[in-house]
Amino acid sequence: MLDKSPAHSAVSVPNDLAAHWMPFTANRAFKKNPRLLAGAKDMFYFTVDGRKIIDAAAGMWCCNAGHGRTQISEAIAKQAAALDYAPPFQFGIPQAFELASRIADLAPDGLDHVFFCNSGSEAADTALKIALAYHQLNGQGTRTRLIGRERGYHGVGFGGTSVGGIVNNRKMFGTLLAGVDHLPATYDRDKQAFSKGEPDYGAHFADELERLVNLHGASTIAAVIVEPMAGSTGVLPAPKGYLKRLREITAKHGILLIFDEVITGYGRLGFAFAAERYGVLPDMLTFAKGITNGAVPMGGVLVRDTIHDAFMSGPEHMVELTHGYTYSAHPLACAAGLATLDIYRDEKLFERANAMEPKFADAVMSLRKEPNVVDIRTVGLTAGIDLSPRADAPGKRGFDGLNSAFHDNDLMLRVAGDTLALTPPLIVTEDQIGEIVEKVAKVILAVAEGACPGRGAAFFMPLRRARTPVR
């Protein structure tokens, strides 16, 4: 059933968009036809011109409990009034210790220590640095090689970009870190197309790690980092048995295994963490996004006891790990995190996502006969819909789909090249899933050959300031 409730009133917008250099955005195209947001509540965003947009992306994989949760905003406001900032080096706040304990309780047994940072990018770089330092402490300083995976995404720090495997994120920045290798991607469309959940084919892709061990020697490899589901590259679930096989090989060779759960953590795959879904215990696990429902930046690394305890040596007055951030365990982020975990627990959102998974998968798979659809993958409350690229412009069909969704169909989704990604908040209802799928079908039709989507809402053209030449 389509939502017919009244739209919000329009709000004023700036008449100059030039100063803001936007991240991961086609800036010139955006500023000709902006997608501007003014508010959000539950499953919806509100645009500056007063339209109501159903959120099929949980913001950016963040807002698992939906938008405008007063429990979270009130906790942030209360904390800001009581303690707006506290230095995280050599000082602490009670909320940070409480939040760390609650996160460790949610995690698989053995992942009992939390190192806080401010984003998924910082979490990935933190985990990689801890891995390198751990081997140094253990007298295995030759273990410096880091291994990621093709089509993997681990943020935009130097470490995360180096082990990441999305070509457009890497090619502009030169060699980055030395001593990095990549496992092959786990995706083979010919054998995995239109899979619900984990594809049956592909566990053997993990065996490529043995080749890298034979090539370099196990004594040179510090860690392997993978996403249980590669999200940013277009939703690639791990094949059945793949993560267990990777765990077996890393354990055999003394290599640390890091799960990047920035996207998959906090209910996205129907469990607190994907490690639980797959029955695999990594040595470290990164998180961000859903920990605060996107309300305040926060990230972190869950670390196994054996790794943490290796650092707890030497004089007690000395810093054990020379790493951290000015805003690690920020009071407002801790308050948001605690309130968010309360919502997940009280509303049983992880269990809800698990129960909704088959209904969501069936609904999205109904799109398989639409024009240009060449594959659909679903796992948890997540789906990737591959559209065939235009011969002369790879990625343009997906970009047009983004515009068509927002401007013409009151829908927010994510795109990765020519893949449409659906990742709705965990509060989504069956009726709303139907609404999302109906709108996606319209988007797919709109970007079929010959269509010209996304032109209907260019409600203003930004004016340009006259600029004084710099001399």
Image: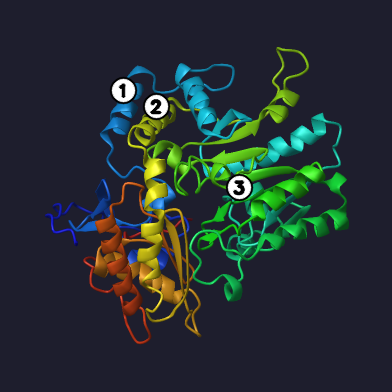
Task: Give x and y (percent) for residue 153.
Answer: 58, 55
Does residue 409 appear to the left or right of 83 in the view shown? left
Q: Which mark is residue 78?
A: 1
Looking at the picture, which amino acid does disc 2 mark? Answer: Ala
Q: CA distance from mark 2 to mark 1?
A: 9 Å
Q: Which amino acid is tagged 3?
A: Gly
For disc 2, the marked residue is 335
Sequence-wise, the earlier of marks 3 and 2 is: 3
* Secondary structure of residue under mark 3: loop
Are discs 2 and 1 less than 8 Å apart at CB? yes
Closest to the observer: 71 or 162? 71
* Visible residue check, residue 33: no
Q: Nearer the viewer, mark 1 or mark 3?
A: 1
Q: CA distance from mark 1 to mark 3?
A: 33 Å
| Discs 3/2, front | 2
Q: Quadrant of residue 321?
A: top right
| 308, above or below 458, in the image | above
Mark 1 vs 3: CB contact within 8 A: no
Q: How is the image coloured?
A: rainbow
The 10 Å Cα crowd at callout 2, few under 14, some 14 to 19, many 20 or more, is many
- What residue is disc 3 on? 157
